[in-house]
Amino acid sequence: MLRDITLGQYYQTDSVIHRLDPRVKLAGTLVYVITLFFYKNFVGYALAILFLALVIRLSKVPFKFMVRGMKSILFLLMITVLFNLFLTPGTPVVSFWKLHITQEGTALAVSMALRLTLLVIGSSLMTLTTTPNNLTDGMEKGMGFLRIFKVPVHDVAMMMSIALRFIPILLEETDKIMKAQMARGADFESGNLIKRAKALVPLLVPLFVSAFRRANDLAMAMEARCYRGGDGRTKMKPLKYKGRDFTAYAILLFFMVFSIWAGRLRLPMLMVGIVQ
Amino acid sequence: MSIVKTENVVYEYQRLDEEGNVEGVTTAVDHVSLDVKEGSFIAILGHNGSGKSTLAKHINAILSPKEGSVWVDGLDTAQEENLWEVRSRAGMVFQNPDNQIIGQVVEEDVGFGPENMGVPTKEIWERVEESLRAVGMYEYRKHSPNKLSGGQKQRVSIAGVLAMHPKVIVLDEPTAMLDPTGRKEVIRAARGLNQVEGVTVILITHYMEEIVHADQVFVMDHGKIAMQGTPREIFSQVERLKELRLAVPQVTLLAHELKQSGIPLPDGILTRKELVEALVAYKNSQK
Amino acid sequence: MPIQIEHLTHIYGDDTTLAVKALDDINLTISDGEFIGLIGHTGSGKSTLVQHLNGLLKASSGSILFDGQNIYDKGYDLKALRSQVGLVFQYPEHQLFEIDVFSDVCFGPKNLGLSEEEVKERATKALESVGIPKELYNQSPFDLSGGQKRRVAIAGVLAMDPKVLILDEPTAGLDPQGREEILDLIKGLQTKSHMTILLVSHSMEDVAEYVDRILVMNHGRVVYDGTPKEVFAHYKELEDIGLACPQVTYVCHDLHDAGFDVDLTATTVDEAKESILRALG
């Protein structure tokens, strides 16, 4: 049951998007998400959808993998849509009982739904096309400027990559401890909330003990291999920009400027909402 | 030439009570002096809790002796400024295969040590390739460590240490958590390091079958060196080993028992071939 | 309470393209009071098999009859089954969690809903049977030595008062004497407490010394089933599937080839010694 959880949902294939420098993808995702908040008409959204569709096509990742990420936010999406639909004041279109669906509300609900959907699909595209390793490398290098503000960028990246390595191991261990306690008659599935929470103690204590033991072992193994933080370290796979990365940056910049410009034109029929 | 030398090393663990006060001390290593020649294959034996792992951690400067000194390739491990040099000259492989692999891809894990040492990128790749080839794991270089068997993981760990170009490798019970196939793989890799690469190997174990080929064996008990000698000298003392909570391989035990029953066999028989030859020789002499 | 396994098959990842047949049509009967060694290399299916016997894993097809009743029948009480068929996992000390040794051993019987008195009685009995002295009852299990921790964990399963005890590599990571102590303890459970024992192991030498019957698994199937002598007679085939016989078996074969009239079925040091002495006259 626990094995079904997949983290760092990388989709293995060879595409232009896969080969891009992780920094480009990180920056691209960031730019994409930010621009989504600048649009005031549906032309902007149309451009954003078009752009995303194009990138997905280039990435060779089947569309169903994108949708998978949507499942987790379905509830949030529904709430957002309903609230905007019913609670935005303006010209009523449909009314029943005390609720009114307004023109402005509809436009706002649609735009919010689009924003959320594009945001999720856009960022899952990044994780689908970048190995967790590459991603942490990209973050370490791409966020290097944060070091000026005393942010331990290298250490955070190292922590992330270690966490990613140990998640499957700890999941397997959880499964094993659970079974071992079940063999001693433990019951994780029945009873009320309090009873179930209590039933987790025999699972969580050994799991924490094991996690600490592993952390201790790992720290020792790292020190034994001369690890002493990021200073003076060289890289086996250093990140280097290639021609296509600069092209990608240029396309991104163009997309950002153009879609924001188009997305803020005053086109009365296509406006998102007057209240904005 | 000596590559690792310890002189009267003492190490104590403090036992703390619930409030964190010192309740007592356990002497894990008690005045140990040993001298390891460069290029040799050394085995340190001992039951669980005999102090062998604590001693091993001194060679890599993970622990520093409370009394006495440890020198690795002439460097005093207690000197702060020697720390990283000691660790790059004396590599260490630990017991649990899962808890010492840092990379998410085999080759990246092997590159971890050289990266830390500041080796230039191009050279890292060369070292990774040659180390993975030395332990026979080159074709797995792109694999995730999670998908490997225990023996394969330990070989990756050995490659990770080898890529740091150490002069000595300490293997701290590398086979304790493996199945017989995995144990054989790891021991074969360790012997390869010693014979092909010329690295000094210090193997810590309680599996007697693994030390048959060692040049010298030290047996530890209560933090002290209880016995030392060649495998043959050690294995000839079956009763003494039993006292130290150890057991000899079946072949040695059988030879010992036959001898007790009056068959004149040489002491410390190590292999099946030796036993069979000795028995054949005895039978022929009877005629 | 015999266990009958009929046409047991287990497929991992049945609904995906990566389906793996971990168990393939297993048929076995385990009778009362037997001491069985289950051998196979990593991935041969032995751990999967034992997890079926107490209902932790459910078979894809086939059935398991415990005391004549199919455990896959509707309404079958799996919790009761788990108290009858005790399973000690590999490195069982990793599941200890209570503040002291005694409470940890009480966990199993408490889950069975027994009275406090009975729980304590069972825990005491279990701890005594694994040789943990009274002084340690109130200690934290995390402060014990490796060997002691393992015994406490085994006691945790024994306190369920099972009729069948399955142990997955109970000697892993222990030193030679620790291994012998645990194996002697297990043998005692069979002879004194009349439990049926199923010992999962890598070590042919340990198994040959202690068990009455050996099951060898390979690729999810039981390939050999018989007394140690019968099974080790296939020493060449065993090697092909990555398993080695006890060293003495090889010695006897070598001696036989060298013209000695030795017993080829010797599987322990004692048997080999007797046989060689006889051959030498």
Image (cartoon, rainbow, N blue to C red):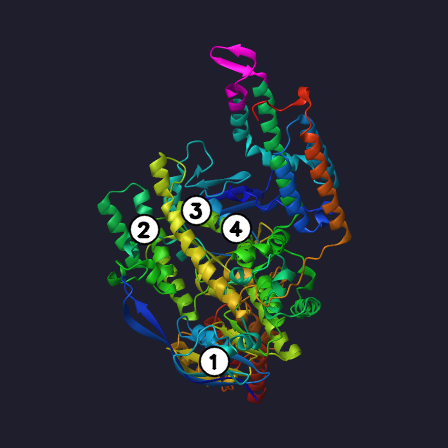
Task: Give the alpha-carbon distance from disc 1 to disc 2, as whole Å.
Answer: 53 Å
Task: Give the alpha-carbon distance from disc 2 to disc 3, as whole Å.
Answer: 18 Å
Q: Which residue is mark 4?
A: A167
Front-most of C153 and A162?
Answer: A162
Category of crowding for the residue at label 1, using alpha-carbon neighbours closer than 10 angstroms: few (below 14), some (14–19), many (at least 20): few
Task: Confirm whether circles 2 and 3 share one chain.
Answer: no
- Residue B79: image tag: 1
Category of crowding for the residue at label 3, using alpha-carbon neighbours closer than 10 angstroms: few (below 14), some (14–19), many (at least 20): many
**Which is more foreground, mark 1 or mark 4?**
1
- The residue that appears at 64% across and 23% down in the rendered structure is A271
**Chain of the residue under the numbered disc 2 shown in the image:** C
Over which residues does the magenta segment extend? Answer: A83-103
Provide residue B245's location: percent of width, then percent of height.
40, 74
Q: Magenta includes A85?
A: yes
Amino acid bearing label 2: Ala
Front-most of C211 and A174?
Answer: A174
**Chain of the residue under the numbered disc 4 shown in the image:** A
Q: Which residue is mark 3?
A: A178
**Chain of the residue under the numbered disc 3 shown in the image:** A
Q: Magenta includes A58?
A: no
